[in-house]
Image (cartoon, rainbow, N blue to C red):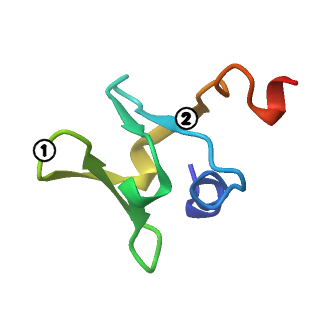
Amino acid sequence: MHADEIKQFLHASPFRPFTVYLAIEKSFVVPHQDFAWLTPKGRTLFVSVADKEAVDLLDVALISRIEPHEPPPGSPKNQ
């Protein structure tokens, strides 16, 4: 995975929540664009844990895929 691909998900308009998967199938949910950010050189993705004051640090090179969540019923994408 490249940082530019991640940026497309982070800056999508409208934003859609997504899940980041590592090669070991561990996953991290990004419910809002304020919950994730890349380091300036794009080597590390920080993902805030929604229920806690914690952050997961992910090596971008180990991210195998990102899957966007389905838009909620009634959203413009489903009409």
Give coordinates of residue 1: x percent, y percent. 56, 48
Residue 64 placement, left or right of 56? right
Label 2 neighbour load within 10 Å: few <14, some 14-19, many 20+: some
Give coordinates of residue 32: x percent, y percent. 46, 49
Query: Label 2 vs label 1: CA separation?
Result: 24 Å
Q: Against 54, is 73 above or below?
A: above
Q: Which residue is mark 1?
A: 52
Q: Quadrant of residue 29?
A: top left
Q: In what element is the residue under mark 1?
A: loop
Residue at x 37%, y 54% (from the top left corner) = 35
Label 1 neighbour load within 10 Å: few <14, some 14-19, many 20+: few
Residue 3 placement, left or right of 46? right
- What numbered label is drawn on residue 68? none
Comparing marks 2 and 1, which lies closer to the viewer?
Answer: 1
Residue 75 placement, left or right of 10? right
Q: Quadrant of residue 63?
A: top left
Which amino acid, by three-letter code, is at mark 2? Answer: Arg
Give coordinates of residue 4: x percent, y percent. 64, 63
Q: Are marks 2 and 1 in contact (CB under 8 Å)?
A: no
Q: Which residue is mark 2?
A: 65
Quadrant of image for the C terminus: top right
Which amino acid, by three-letter code, is at mark 1? Answer: Lys
Q: Nearer the viewer, residue 76 or 46?
A: 76
Residue at the left extreme, as displayed: 53
